Amino acid sequence: MTDARFEDGAERPLYLGAEDAEDLKIISALVQDAVLPITEMRYRPAKRQFLMLVNRFRWEDHSAEAERVRSILVFEGVTAVRSQGIDRADRDTILSVLSLDWAPGADGAGVLHVVLAGDGALALQMEALDATLRDVTRPYLAVSGRAPRHD
């Protein structure tokens, strides 16, 4: 058996799950500054799923190049979705994710808040916290050529 090497983790797509608030913090950090057209969100009530196809900045890549990757966020056990500060009729709207936050309720249920730039937000009523983040494309250079700034 050999020890893991730093190089072993390079350029592999992420596939992460969250079943508690600590896990969600990791996914939240990875999708910070992700952007998506409003048309890339879907609530599938019959399957109790909410999906978001995002273009996320690769915060885990510390190289000099600013890269993004398309990733899918899947939330399972969703029983209701509410939005605030979003004009869902404006199909040209581009949303920017600031954070994901979990507010626990009774018996493992709770509300997952998707905080968006510009005072927008989504609230997903969930039976339990069950989220996955999976990269679905190869990384590509960010159009701006640089990482988002956080001053």
Image (spheres, rainbow, N blue to C red):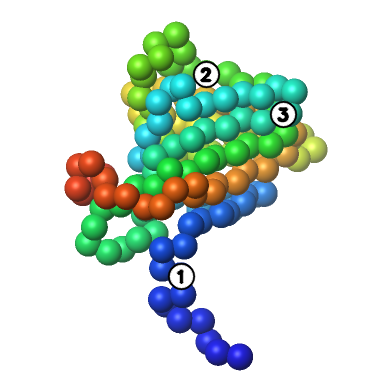
Q: Residue furthest bottom?
A: 1
State left or right for residue 73 relative to residue 65. right
Q: Give the CA separation, mark 1 to mark 3.
A: 33 Å
Q: Residue at x 66, y 24 (%)?
A: 44
In the picture of the structure, the residue carrying the numbered disc 1 is: 9
Residue 19 x, y percent position in the rendering: 67, 49
Amino acid marked by disc 2? Ser
Q: Which is nearer the eye, 113 or 45?
A: 45
Look at 49% across and 35% down and name the residue there: 53
* Mark 2 to mark 1 CA distance (whole Å): 37 Å
Label 1 or label 3, whichever comes before in sequence order: 1
Q: Where is mark 2, residue-wise?
A: 83
- Asked if residue 10 lies left or right of residue 62, the reply is right
- Mark 2 and 1 residues: CB-CB less than 8 Å, in contact? no
Q: Which residue is mark 3?
A: 48
Write the residue at 51% across / 56% down.
14
Q: Amino acid at mark 3?
A: Arg
The x and y percentages for residue 137 are 44, 48
Image coords of residue 31 (percent x, y): 44, 44
Label 1 crowd bin: few (<14), some (14–19), many (20+), radius 10 Å: few
Question: Is 45 drawn above or below residue 22 in the view shown?
Answer: above
Q: Nearer the viewer, residue 65 or 119?
A: 65
Front of the two marks 2 and 1: 1
Q: Position of residue 7 (x, y in %)?
A: 41, 76
- Secondary structure, mark 3, is loop
| Residue 28 in view of the camera | no
Mark 1: secondary structure: helix
Q: Quadrant of residue 92?
A: top left
